[in-house]
Amino acid sequence: PSNTTGPNLELRQYQGVWMLGTVVPGLISLQRHFRSRPGDVLLASPVKSGTTWIKSLTFATMARFSYPPCAADHPLRRLNPHECVPYMEEVFLHGQEAKLEALPSPRIMHTHLHYSLLPRSLAKCKTVFVCREPKDMVVSLWHFLNRAGVNFSFSEVIELICDGKNPNGPFWDHVLGYWRASKVRPDGVLFVRYEKMLVDPVSTVRELGRFLGVPFSAAEEAAELPMEICKLCSFDTMRGLQGNKTGSTGEFNFAHQSYFRKGIVGDWVNHMTPKTARRIDTTVEEKLRGSGLTFTS
Ligand code: A3P
C-alpha cells in the first residue's frame, strides 16, 4: 500500500484476524485482564459502520433516567460519543483500565474485535453489533483515512477489503461471528444494521431499550422519549454539537468532526464503477453463502 507518511498501519494476523500491529498488545492485555461486571453492555462493529451513532443511541437510552435527552447538561451535548463510550482495545493498549473501573454500572464499552477474539467474560455481556453494507463502508473508510492524512488510494482500499486484509478483517468473518452468535443467543447478541437504523431510528431505539432491559414505559412513549433520543442523536444534531466540531480522539488523533461525513445509504454509486461494485458484492456474498446473512437485495 502507498501509505508512507501517515500513522503506522502495518497489519498482522492474530488468531486468524488481521489487526493493526500497534493494537495487538492492547488486545492481548484485554484478553488477559478484562473483568466484567453484571450489567455490562458491549457495543461491537466493523469500522465506519455506525459506531458513533450506536454509541450515542445506546448511551442516551441507558442514561435517560439521569439525563433526559432534552437536558441542557446531557453528556452528549458536551462530549464526543467516543468519549462517552470507551474503546476497549485502546484502553488496554494504554493501560487505562482504571477508566473502565471508574465507569458507573451499567457500563457501556465498545470494541472492533471479532466475536472469536472476545475474552469469555466479555462475550457473556449483552452485546449490540452494528454493521453496514460493505460498499458504503469502504467509501466511508477511504474518506476517513484521507481526512486523517493517510495516503491510500481508493483502489488500494478496495483490494484490502476484497482480500480480507483490512484492520479487523476479513469483513465477512467479522459479521458472521456476531450473526451466528445472535442466532444462538438472541437474548445476548443483538444484530443491527446501519441501513435499518436510518429508515426507522425510533424502532431501533425501542429495540435497544427492550434488549438492554430498559424498555420504554407507556409514560415515556407518551412523552415521545424514543423520538427525542433519535433527535438528539441524529446526524444533523450531533454534527453541530460543540464536542463533535472540535477536538480529536484516539490512538491516531482522529478529528471528532471526521466521524460525521454524509450519513446516507448508497454513496458508493458516486465512487465506484459497476464492475468494482460487482466485485465487492460477489466476494462478500460468496463468503456469506449459506449463512442466511446477505448485504445485497
Ligand atoms: P459516511 O462516511 O458514509 O458519512 P463510524 O462511526 O463507525 O466510524 O461510522 C462513520 C459513519 O457513520 C460515517 O458515514 C458517518 O457520517 C456516519 N454517522 C455518524 N454519525 C451518524 C448519525 N448520527 N446518523 C447517521 N450516520 C452517522
Image (spheres, helix red, strand yellow):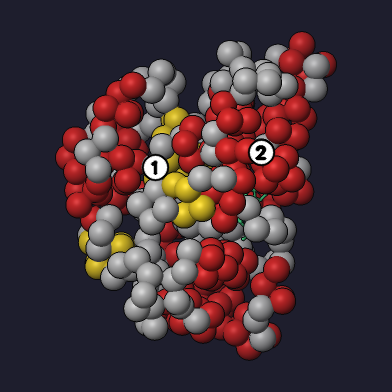
Question: Where is mark 1, residue-wise?
Answer: 87
- Asked if the residue under mark 2 is in contact with the one under mark 1, i.e. CB atoms within 8 Å, the reply is no
Instruction: Check residue 33 in the rendering and tell me which mark sits there, or answer none.
Output: none
Where's residue 16, x and y in %?
A: 26, 64
**Which of the two discs, 1 and 2, sits closer to the camera?**
2
Where's residue 277, x and y in %?
A: 62, 80
Vertical arrangement, residue 197 with respect to residue 19, above or below: above
Look at 53% across and 65% down and name the residue there: 147
Please identify the quarter of the rendering in which residue 20 is found: bottom left
Look at 42% across and 58% down and name the residue there: 174
Vertical arrangement, residue 59 with respect to residue 148, above or below: above
Of labels 1 and 2, earlier in sequence is: 1
Where's residue 215, x and y in %?
A: 63, 20
Where's residue 163, x and y in %?
A: 40, 78
Left or right for 14, reference 271: left
User: What amino acid is labelled 1 in the image?
Assistant: Tyr
Check the picture and name the quadrant holding the N terminus: bottom left
Any part of residue 18 in sight = no
Look at 47% across and 69% down and name the residue there: 149
Question: Where is mark 2, residue-wise?
Answer: 241
Look at 67% across and 33% down and name the residue there: 205
Q: CA distance from mark 1 to mark 2?
A: 21 Å
Q: Which residue is nearer to you in this view: 233 or 94? A: 94
Please tell me whether mark 2 sits on a helix, a strand or a loop: loop
